[in-house]
């Protein structure tokens, strides 16, 4: 889920090493998941995610315990809004391809602290 929401201006940077620079005003959501949870550390900006069921992308480098996502076009997103890293509506294969890996690695790397919702 989103644990923070921040508005940034053009030229402001996000992520380890400030690797992502905003080209326009943006709203950034911080997701409570990172490489310590099994999310691929090497996933680049632009890796797809769903926020409240709406497709968007990661921005900046993946941190140990969080990732940043672009929620500029998701006006109803706020702290506590659910985030799907892969699953219903977003195939693990698509996320894996964006990160340069395979879906099996994503699924095997998940830490036990990551909430997993099973689809009936």
Image (cartoon, grey):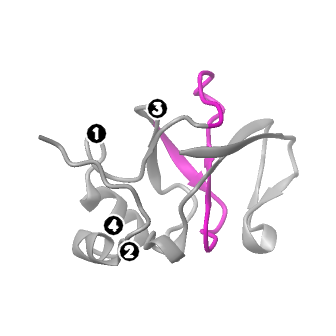
Asked whether residue 76 appears in the rendered view, the answer is yes
For disc 2, the marked residue is 100
Magenta segment main secondary structure: loop
Residue 72 picture location, percent across and down: 66, 32
Crowding at mark 3 (Cα within 10 Å: few <14, some 14-19, many 20+): some
Element at badge 2?
loop
Q: For the residues carrying marks 3 and 2, which lies nearer the camera in this image?
A: 3
Query: Start and end of the magenta stretch?
Result: 55-79
According to the picture, the residue beneath numbered tag 1 turns out to be 89
Residue marked by disc 4: 96
Q: Residue at x 75, y 37 (%)?
A: 26
Mark number, residue 52: 3
Towards the viewer: 81 or 87: 81
Which element type, helix, strand or loop, lies under badge 4? Answer: helix
**Can you see residue 42?**
no
Is the residue marked by circle 1 packed among few (<14), some (14-19), or many (20+) residues within 10 Å? few
């Amino acid at each position: 889920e989103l644990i923070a929401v921040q508005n940034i201006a053009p030229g402001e940077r996000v992520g380890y090493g400030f690797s992502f620079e905003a080209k326009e005003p943006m709203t950034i959501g911080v997701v409570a998941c990172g490489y310590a949870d099994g999310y691929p550390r090497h996933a680049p900006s632009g890796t797809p995610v769903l926020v409240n069921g709406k497709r968007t992308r990661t921005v900046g480098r993946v941190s140990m315990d969080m990732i940043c996502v672009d929620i500029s076009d998701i006006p109803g997103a706020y702290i506590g809004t659910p985030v799907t890293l892969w699953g219903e509506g977003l195939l693990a294969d698509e996320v894996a391809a964006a990160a340069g890996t395979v879906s099996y690695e994503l699924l095997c790397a998940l830490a036990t602290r990551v909430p997993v919702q099973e689809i009936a």
